[in-house]
Amino acid sequence: MSRPNMRQRGREAPVELTRPNRYQTVMSSTVVLAANATGTALPARKLRALRIWLGALATLIVVMILVGGATRLTESGLSITEWKPVLGAIPPLTEAEWHEAFEAYKQIPQYTEVNRGMSLEDFKTIYWWEWTHRFLGRLIGAVFLLPFLALWIAGYIPRTLLPRLLGLFLLGGIQGAIGWYMVMSGLVDRVSVSQYRLMAHFGIALVILAYTLWLLFGLGRERARFAASPASAWIAWGVLALIFVQMLAGALVAGLDAGLGFNTWPLINGAFGQNNLAGNLIQPGIGQPSPRLLTVVRRMPDGCQVPILVDLHRALVDPSERILVQAGDVLVLQETPCQAMVRYFTQNFEFTGIFTLFRHRDALGAAAVVAP
């Protein structure tokens, strides 16, 4: 028998447009975002436009996270005490407007208890950090919304991508609300924002960045179907989860200024994971020398903190090496690296029987004390 002809007289055989193929990788199982409503692939110019747009968004998000970190480190986040989503984009333009913003800042505890006496010029410095951070948030919203509407009207956005982009826009709105919720925590009873709200604010920023990159990297990437190892998937997700948790912990450390609690490295006060505040490290014994270094952290009238290093061994024999502790000073005892290593080995190896013969009482460990 003769094979049937694929062509009929006067017309070609119909071609079926299939649905987008699914592919599976170690990290995800998703539909390729490179097809329009009918299932046909998008032209290269449309994919290029979408990639440039999402790439620009991801870049701005990274910049905003970095500026947010600088805003936290400079303690600038409470310099703007009101939230105006539209009019707030315009900074003070006249001397009178600057004085008005400064007077509003003087009403919150951070000024009355920490930055009392700050000059207007110093206030402008912290104001510009916070204004820049908020301005970047508004800019990201505009860079998302305006191109989104233009690309959607022009038919550049496939149907499979539309709900994902709307979800990204919703996350951005939630992030703005949580940002103001965080700032509110430091306007009444605190001199800084809540560390838990700071962690939530930072965590959502990471989620938004990861989600944007996921959309960007999955756009138009057709990959062959292959079976991913379940073990590989668990390992990959586990590593990502650990990184995410570690970064959230960093936000808590920043919110609490906890980095000053244990200022030795690589060991934490001569050991791993032990808490000096619970008394676990306050153990007398040979080979556990008293901390030699003392750092006096003194806050100056302009609000900046100045560390003053004191060698306790030298101060005991030389009065000129001594310092008068003032009210509000923070005293941080610190071991030398050699002392920290000696402490670690003596506490983690069974030398207790020998050391018992030579026990003596020393002031051990690192501690922070605020002078009354």
Image (cartoon, rainbow, N blue to C red):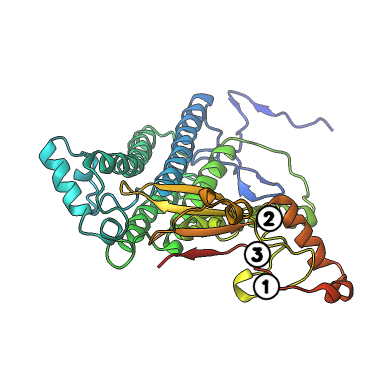
Mark 1 / mark 3, whichever is N-terminal: 1
Q: Position of residue 348 (x, y in %)?
A: 81, 66
Query: Decide: marks 1, 2 in contact (CB < 8 A)?
Result: no
User: In the image, is 222 to the left or to the right of 36?
Assistant: right
Q: Earlier in the sequence, mark 3 or mark 2?
A: 2
Residue under circle 2? 237
Tell me the amino acid under the disc marked 3.
Gly
Quarter of the image for residue 97 reads top left
The label shown at residue 282 is: 1
Q: In this orientation, does residue 335 appear?
A: yes
How crowded pointer 3 is (Cα within 10 Å; few <14, some 14-19, many 20+) is rated as: many
The crowding category of the residue bearing disc 2, from other C-alpha atoms within 10 Å (few below 14, some 14 to 19, many at least 20), is some
The relative height of residue 23 versus residue 268 in the rendered view (above or below) is above
| Amino acid type of the residue tagged 2 in the rendering | Trp
Instruction: Pick the residue in front: 232 or 64.
Output: 64
Question: Mark 1 to mark 2: distance in Å?
Answer: 40 Å
Amino acid at the residue labelled 1: Ile
N-terminal of the pair, mark 1 or mark 2, is 2
User: Element under label 2?
Assistant: helix
Q: Position of residue 272 (x, y in %)?
A: 72, 63
Relative to the observer, which residue lies in front, 20 or 336?
336
Q: Read off the residue under disc 3.
A: 365
User: Image height check: is 301 above or below 288?
Assistant: above
Closer to viewer: mark 3 or mark 2? 3
Q: Say whether marks 1 and 3 touch (CB < 8 Å).
A: yes
